[in-house]
């Protein structure tokens, strides 16, 4: 166990299980995110320049991570569901809250599934917003926060995504 209360990092022999496909920064709420090739993560705040990073420190919704399969099934583009990180990682939806993901130089803790908001259909421009919201149940990705680890870092398109453990539920 590290001094931060997180499990010690596993050895470098862990094989990447996914890849960052796209990165998006939401400059203003309810707007289309802007694609970026890399972004700096801020411990306990989220992604630098993103509207969700301006919330009070410790928010469980610092980052929304989404598997690209959901977008492909719905005929959408990266960022359409207001995710900041689009990954190629099909088991994402099955991971429990507390799972730690190493994404590039950053460790994120999953805080739970993202429930589809009532206005997401309108933002995407679908004819039946209520039906679209229903179709996203259990498929809108995982909320995450940037954990207090060794250092803040950068996430880049093409970076590996690796499950490195789970947060210890007992205080350190």
Image: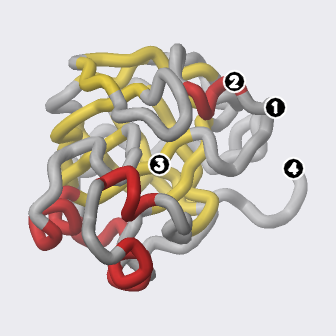
Question: Where residue 54 is drawn, which disc sits there?
Answer: 2
Say left or right for 15 vs 140: left
Residue drawn at x 16%, y 66% as measured from the top left: 69
Q: Bin the neighbour count of mark 2 within 10 Å (Cα to Cα): few under 14, some 14-19, many 20 and up.
A: some
Q: Specify few, some or many for label 3: CA neighbours under 10 Å numbering under 14, 14-19, or 20 or more.
A: many
- The numbered dot on residue 172 is 4
* Tag nearer the camera, 4 or 1: 1
- Residue occupying the far right of the picture: 171
Label 4 vs 1, first from the N-terminus: 1
Give x and y (percent) for residue 65: 40, 50
Task: Name the N-terminal-most of marks 1 and 3.
Answer: 1
Q: CA distance from mark 2 to mark 4?
A: 28 Å
The disc at residue 56 is 1
Say which residue appears at 74% left-offset and 31% top-offset.
Answer: 55
Q: For the residues carrying marks 2 and 4, which lies nearer the camera in this image? A: 2
Q: Secondary structure at mark 3?
A: strand
Secondary structure beneath label 1: loop
Q: Are marks 1 and 3 in contact (CB under 8 Å)?
A: no
């Amino acid at each position: 166990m590290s001094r931060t209360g997180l499990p010690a990092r596993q050895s470098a022999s862990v094989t990447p299980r996914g890849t960052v496909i796209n990165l998006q920064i939401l400059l203003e709420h309810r707007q289309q995110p802007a694609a970026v090739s890399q972004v700096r993560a801020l411990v306990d705040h989220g992604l630098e320049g993103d509207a969700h990073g301006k919330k009070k420190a410790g928010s469980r919704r610092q980052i929304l991570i989404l598997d690209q399969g959901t977008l492909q099934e719905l005929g959408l583009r990266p960022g359409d569901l207001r995710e900041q990180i689009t990954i190629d990682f099909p088991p994402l939806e099955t991971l429990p809250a507390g799972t730690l993901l190493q994404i590039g130089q950053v460790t994120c803790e999953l805080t739970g599934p993202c429930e589809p908001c009532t206005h997401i259909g309108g933002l995407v421009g679908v004819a039946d917003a209520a039906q679209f919201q229903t179709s996203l149940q259990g498929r809108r990705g995982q909320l995450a926060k940037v954990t207090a680890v060794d250092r803040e870092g950068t996430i880049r398109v093409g970076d590996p995504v690796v499950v490195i453990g789970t947060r210890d539920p007992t205080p350190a």
